[in-house]
């Protein structure tokens, strides 16, 4: 997985997916659960904004491996 390889170089990555189980199995560290498989960032602008803002916050946060966050809808 590309996110894991980028993290290995010391660059933090947030992985947005509607399948967080797969992301944890692969070893991603910062995972945000997206609302739908076809639209992991959501359908409306407000939802997309909340997901992106949360992702940007997580880039600055030290986390335990395989941490999954939910974003309020």
Image: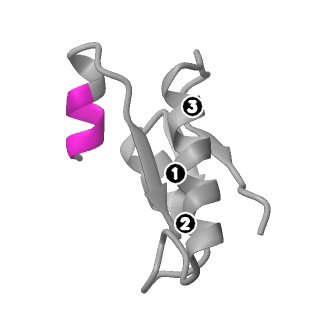
**Residue annotated with mark 2:** 48
Q: What is the quadrant of the C terminus in the image?
A: bottom right
The reply to whether the C-beta atoms of the residues labelled 2 and 3 are less than 8 Å apart is no
Using residue 39 as the reference point, say whether residue 62 is left or right of it.
right
State whether residue 28 is above or below residue 32.
above
**Residue annotated with mark 1:** 52
Judge whether residue 5 is colored magenta: yes
Residue 56 in the image: x percent, y percent? 51, 36
Identify the image's colour scheme: rainbow, by chain, secondary structure or one colour.
Answer: one colour
Q: Which mark is residue 58?
A: 3
Residue 64 in the image: x percent, y percent? 61, 22
Residue 71 in the image: x percent, y percent? 71, 56
| Residue depicted at 54% across the width and 83% down the height | 43
State whether residue 39 is above or below residue 1.
below
Dot 3 or dot 1: first in sequence order is 1
Please, which residue is most extreme toward the right here?
Answer: 72
State whether residue 8 is above or below residue 53.
above
Magenta range: 2-6
Instruction: Say which of 11 and 47 sits in front.
Output: 47
């Amino acid at each position: 997985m590309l996110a894991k390889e980028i993290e290995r170089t010391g660059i933090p990555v947030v992985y947005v997916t509607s399948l967080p189980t797969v992301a944890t199995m692969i070893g991603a560290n910062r995972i945000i659960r997206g609302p739908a498989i076809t639209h992991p960032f959501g359908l409306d602008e407000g939802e997309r904004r909340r997901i992106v803002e949360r992702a940007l916050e997580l880039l600055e946060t030290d986390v335990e491996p395989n941490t999954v966050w939910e974003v309020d809808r």
